[in-house]
Image: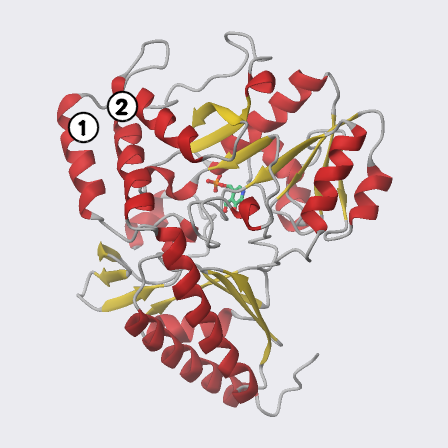
Amino acid sequence: MAVESLYLANVFSKKPLVFTRGKGALLWDINGKEYIDCASSYGVAALGHCHPKIVAAIQLQAEQLVTLHSCYYNDKRAEFVQKLVSITPKGLDKVFLSNSGAESVECAIKLVRKATGKSEIIGVMGAYHGKTMGALSLTWDKKYREPFLPLVPDIKHVAPDNSDKIREAITDKTAAIIMEPVRGEGGIRVPSEGYLQQVREICNEKDVLLIFDEVQTSFGRTGKLFCCQNWNVTPDIMCLAKPFAGGLPIGITVARADLMSTFRVGEHSTTFSGSPLVCAAGCAALDVLIEEDLAGKAVVNGKYFKSQLEKLVSKRKIIKEVRGLGLMLGMELRCDVYGVIMKALGKGVLIIDAGKTVLRILPPLVISKEQIDKVIKVLDESLEEEENERSGNTISN
Ligand SMILES: Cc1ncc(COP(=O)(O)O)c(C=O)c1O
């Protein structure tokens, strides 16, 4: 801990624990203490930690070829994009590979400008799209944006879940609208019924492209392979990342072929795009996603998890609401969540926040019912302790 603190930029809100091992939904710290991971490294470890098929694929590929620039062809890269496109929504069949969620968004920003010749992009208040300059310009929270002004021009944000606001915001300069189908960092907000369909219709009518940032919501997390499939709405471009290479860094921008073909050679690239090692892990990750029906697991485990969380609402005054879809769950408190997160951590459960007052629960999709029961017990105890500490303090609505 001292060495990391000495040498690394102080930009992460560090918790005083050192993790050295993981298996499935479990992590162990350097002292051998066991934890249930309900954070999955912000949604990356959807397959669980050290899935044997991912480990084997990485080991095998590491002995064959680790890196190869995309100016040459590679068998694993071809296999990966073929497998990927076989499961993406119909019409989304051209891929650009990068290394992170933010990079997948950067590609989308450049692509919509190139494909339409227009500059303006409309985002949503509360959205999170990453922290590189383009992605940051689409991210809403001013605490991330203000220290770095000026950002990319011609970007505006409209109120979420209100299609009239989108219609009003569109001008003849508008290239695209971008949104997360379920907002993650913005507090685990599931859209109201019909909203995404209305947005799709407005985009069709006004000839504006629709980008879904599915960096957090895809890979079965919300009960479908891609979250937009919960409402049968297909975007023109989709941004993916996090679990798609079983834990290795990946970003994926997948678009309609006619859009992606507007990029000319050299207009967009990155050195690590589609390395054989990452693609081998990605092939194994996609195989596990389908073979183990992780989307189905997210439905069953998510329903159970949510119902158990909801039982706590009547018990603990500190809870305002439980929300979510599949295994993308949120519990809004009537106070700051930091104390509860630290208490749960001390009791062996990793939970993260989604804004100041929302607990975000993103476990590996392979979490068991017994593990969920343990998490609920820890959460209940942590909420009770927080409530007792705060009794006497006014809890605002
Ligand atoms: C919806 C969404 N988009 C983009 C990103 C940025 O991804 P990365 O941190 O890999 O750059 C995130 C990260 O949490 C995200 O949740």
| Marks 1 & 2, CB-CB < 8 Å contact | yes
Q: Is residue 354 visible?
A: yes
Query: Which amino acid, by three-letter code, is at mark 2?
Result: Lys
Indicate which disc residue 76 carries: 2
Looking at the image, residue 188 sits to the left or right of residue 286; the answer is right
Indicate which disc residue 61 carries: 1
Asked which secondary structure carries label 1, the reply is helix
Front-most of residues 62 and 396: 62
Looking at the image, residue 395 sits to the left or right of residue 13; the answer is right
> Percent x, y for residue 298?
41, 58
Alpha-carbon distance for marks 1 and 2?
A: 9 Å
The residue lying at 55 percent from left, 82 percent from top is 313
The residue lying at 64 percent from left, 48 percent from top is 127
Query: Which amino acid, by three-letter code, is at mark 1?
Result: Gln
The vertical placement of 296 against 336, above or below, is above
Q: State the quadrant of the N terminus.
A: bottom left
> Percent x, y for residue 114?
65, 16
Q: Earlier in the sequence, mark 1 or mark 2?
A: 1
Can you tell which quarter of the image residue 186 is in? bottom right
The residue lying at 36 percent from left, 58 percent from top is 297
Which circle, 1 or 2, is nearer the viewer? 2
